[in-house]
Image (cartoon, coloured by chain):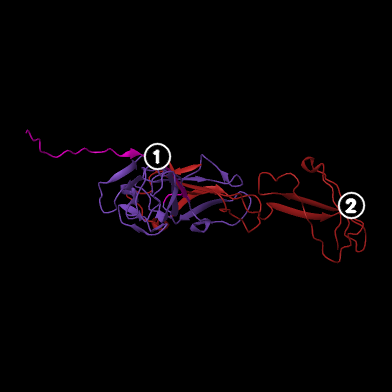
């Protein structure tokens, strides 16, 4: 009798999560924000499964909390356990006290995947690393942070020097520049202007 | 819009700009003591993206009225208790006033203005009218 002995294994590929979306509020750069991820479970999980949100570099160390619990935040990801297991379940994950990155525009995508076993990092069932982005906008400086003074308080076309003291809220990039719009009630003589 | 290029060649920490105020010279103050509309302040990065801004609540108020450049008040009759006309001549510091500007003359209490009437004499006051208001 011939005997064939060996290991018969194969690797299953992970499914793509196509239903995920991300929203955040507020969207100003540098502020503390709440991020909400919505998606629908496409593959069944078990009681020992987990859902993981992976954080791109510009979010690492900038997430303060999460819900629903139980969940844990580390510098590079947020792990949710005791998760729903039934296919087609709508799932909402929330990241709280997220300090928005300082770059204007579309952020790098978060990563979202489910683990069949929370203790096995390679047991990925569903996965996406695209589309979980938000569009960040400029930070509003509180008006109290900008003090405008003049060398003259007299009306009627007395030349004056105006000083603007600006207390920026966020860290600013190198070579930042400033534009000032002068109210129409104050006359700007381009030929004499200097600053 | 006035642009200040490259405020700092290095990264500026939060709050760091406060130590380097910017100055704009030779602006002309508003022509009234009313608050102006808002300044706009915009900080931009090298990609011309606004990173921080404020465009509301940054008003300036001139709180000291200017003196007339010249002003005379000349009566045509100086006899006591007689009716008189007063010629009020003045020139202003500003190059112009806005429409609907008012000239208010407060008379000493010993001058009775109950029957006063008035009219503009010079061409730029042709449409002037007046009314006594109190004493």
- In the picture, residue B120 is in which quadrant? top right
Secondary structure found at label 1:
loop
Is A14 in the magenta?
Answer: yes
Q: Which residue is pictured at 79% across the width and 57% down the height?
A: B105
Classify 10 Å Cα crowding around label 2: few (below 14), some (14-19), many (20 and above): few
What segment is highlighted magenta in the picture? A1-29
Q: What chain does badge 2 belong to?
A: B
Mark linked to residue B117: 2
The residue positioned farthest toward the bottom in the image shown: B110
Mark linked to residue A72: none
**Most common secondary structure along the magenta stretch:** loop
The residue positioned farthest toward the top in the image shown: A2
Nearer to us in this view, A17 or A48: A48
Residue A84 in the image, given as x and y percentages of width and height: 40, 51
Secondary structure found at label 2:
loop
- In the picture, residue A9 is in which quadrant? top left
Residue B9 seen by the camera: no
Q: What chain does badge 1 belong to?
A: A
Is A146 in the magenta?
Answer: no
- In the image, the chain rendered in red is B
């Amino acid at each position: 009798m011939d005997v064939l002995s060996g290991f018969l294994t194969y690797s299953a590929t992970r499914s793509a999560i196509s239903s995920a979306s991300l929203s955040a509020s507020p969207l100003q750069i540098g502020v503390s924000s709440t991020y909400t991820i919505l998606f629908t479970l496409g593959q069944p999980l078990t009681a020992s499964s987990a859902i993981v949100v992976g954080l791109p570099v510009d979010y690492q160390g900038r997430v303060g909390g999460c819900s629903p619990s139980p969940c844990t935040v580390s510098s590079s990801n947020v792990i949710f356990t005791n998760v729903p297991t039934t296919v087609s379940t709508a799932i909402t994950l929330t990241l709280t006290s997220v300090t928005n990155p300082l770059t204007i525009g579309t952020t790098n995508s978060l990563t979202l995947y489910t683990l069949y076993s929370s203790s096995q990092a390679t047991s990925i069932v569903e996965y996406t690393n695209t589309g979980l982005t938000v569009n960040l906008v400029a930070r509003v400086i509180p008006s109290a942070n900008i003090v405008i003074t003049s060398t003259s308080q007299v009306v009627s076309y007395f030349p004056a020097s105006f000083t603007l003291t600006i207390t920026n809220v966020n860290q600013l990039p190198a070579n930042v520049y400033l534009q000032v719009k002068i109210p129409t009630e104050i006359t700007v003589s381009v030929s004499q202007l200097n600053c | 819009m006035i642009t200040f290029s490259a405020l700092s060649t290095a990264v500026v920490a939060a709050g760091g700009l406060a130590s380097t105020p910017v100055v704009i010279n030779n602006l002309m103050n508003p022509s009234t003591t009313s608050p102006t509309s808002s300044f706009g302040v915009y900080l931009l990065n090298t990609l011309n993206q606004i990173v921080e801004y404020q465009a509301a609540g940054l008003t300036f108020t001139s709180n000291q009225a200017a003196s007339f450049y010249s002003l005379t008040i000349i009566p045509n009759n100086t006899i006591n208790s007689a009716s008189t006309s007063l010629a009020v001549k003045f020139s202003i510091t500003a190059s112009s006033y806005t429409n609907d500007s008012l000239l208010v003359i407060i008379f000493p209490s010993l001058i009775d203005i109950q029957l006063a009437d008035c009219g503009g004499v010079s061409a730029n006051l042709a449409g002037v009218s007046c009314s006594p208001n109190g004493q």
